Image: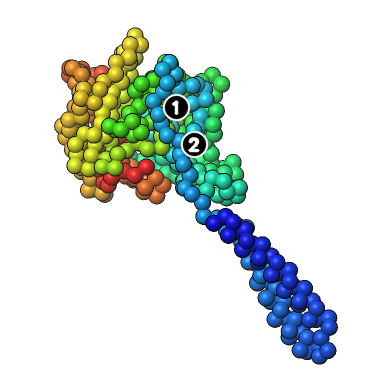
Amino acid sequence: MRRLHTHLRTAAATAATATWAAAMAAATIAVRPAQAIRGAATTLAMALAALTLALMLPALPARADAPVFKAVTPLPPGAALRFPADYGAHPDYKTEWWYVTGWLRTPDGKPLGFQVTFFRSATGHDRANPSRFAPTQLIIGHAALSDPVAGHLLHDQRSARAGFGLAYARSGDTDLKLDDWQMTRQPDGSYAVHLHAANFAFDLKLAPTQPPLLEGDRGYSRKGPRPEQSSYYYSEPQLQVSGSIARAGRSVAVSGAAWLDHEWSSQVLADDAAGWDWVGANLADGGALMAFQIRSKTGATLWAHATWRSASGKITQFAPDQVRFAPQRRWRSPRTGAAYPVATRLTTGDTAWDITPLQDDQELDARRSSGAVYWEGAVTLQRDGKPAGRAYLEMTGYVSAMKL
């Protein structure tokens, strides 16, 4: 196909040159001026048409094979994720996200939940195309503020092709930009988050208090029964948050704790998967808990996993048969009709955690950007009837099956 494209371009250019020469000759040697002018005009029009075709053809993309994305494979013995390089983007993989969720406190003690997410999605466009306009990578952003006084989730979304310094996810370290939404890892390891959404603005600093938590097997996280249904995945729990949020032109100081997930993959879900339930919890004793289940389109659990890091640093991994999400109460969205199990009992091994939402309506409609509708909200955890931590619960695939 590329060879045919080259032949067509060459033929068009040759035709344009020959026709142009013919037009000039006709205008010069014709005996009857009027006929010469008419003939030259016709020939000149043909020349311009041929020249236009020659100029257009280089811009037409040749039919190329779809890009082959790098596969996630188990890490070799003794290997693990590499930092700071793995804080940055991995453009050879299909999908990647940096997910920040957390709880904030205002000076009057008011609790708020917040979310900031940057997605990088590689497209099927020919990556060999040298054009700066070629949409080889898309950058998508979601931001949300959960305030029980509002009675529902405040959220915004954006998307753009990467390029021109306006939108990017850079390799080497966390450096993300989508217009005036930015998240950058600083030399001291903290993250600076700045964004202006439709109904609110964030100006936050997220400072680590613990080392990264490598999920799964040293950062290789299975998401299904087949090894390729997996991702590379680490978390940064117990991030100390400071800064300000603004609404209606009024800025207030906030403090709190956040959780950051960074994950990249080329194939996460099985064909019969509908979505997942996930929780990331900053435990009250300083520990951290992450758990998820992948649900099939029939509602059965296809895969599950959990990681619990104690306050002393001991890490316990839970196999699929040791993790269970049991709905206790559902909330039905008045907008989509989806019924979300907003109150859930999570079991990891012999321990039960009761999950309760800060407010029921924390549904985020992102169909204008990522194409999905999901529930992403602030929740509390109890263990044996006592407060055990604050977390975020994510539930996808309740409106329609997820497609990454």
Mark 2: secondary structure: loop
Q: Can residue 163 be seen from the camera position used here?
A: yes
Q: Is residue 129 above or below residue 311?
A: below
Badge 1 is on which residue? Answer: 253
Q: Residue at x 48, y 44 (%)?
A: 67
Query: Colour mode?
Result: rainbow
In front of the other: 51 or 155: 51
Badge 2 is on which residue? Answer: 92
Residue 314 location, x and y as percent? 33, 11
Q: Residue at x 26, y 20 (%)?
A: 318
Crowd class of label 2 (few under 14; some 14 to 19; many from 20; radius 10 Å): some
The three-letter code of the residue at mark 2 reads: Asp
In front of the other: 176 or 29: 29
Q: In the picture, which quadrant includes the N terminus?
A: bottom right
Residue 53 location, x and y as percent? 63, 66
Distance between the Cα atoms at labels 1 and 2? 39 Å
Mark 1: secondary structure: strand
Q: Can residue 200 be seen from the camera position used here?
A: no
| Tag 1–tag 2 contact (CB < 8 Å) | no
For discs 1 and 2, the disc positioned in front in the rendered view: 2
Q: Quadrant of residue 378?
A: top left
The three-letter code of the residue at mark 1 reads: Ala
Q: Which numbered disc, 1 or 2, marks the residue that appears first in the sequence?
A: 2
Q: Quadrant of residue 61?
A: bottom right
Residue 224 — which label? none
Residue 384 location, x and y as percent? 17, 17
Q: Residue at x 50, y 43 (%)?
A: 137
Query: Taking 160 as reference, is 354 left or right?
Result: left
Q: In the picture, which quadrant includes the C terminus?
A: top left
Residue 379 location, x and y as percent? 28, 29
Q: Quadrant of residue 343?
A: top left
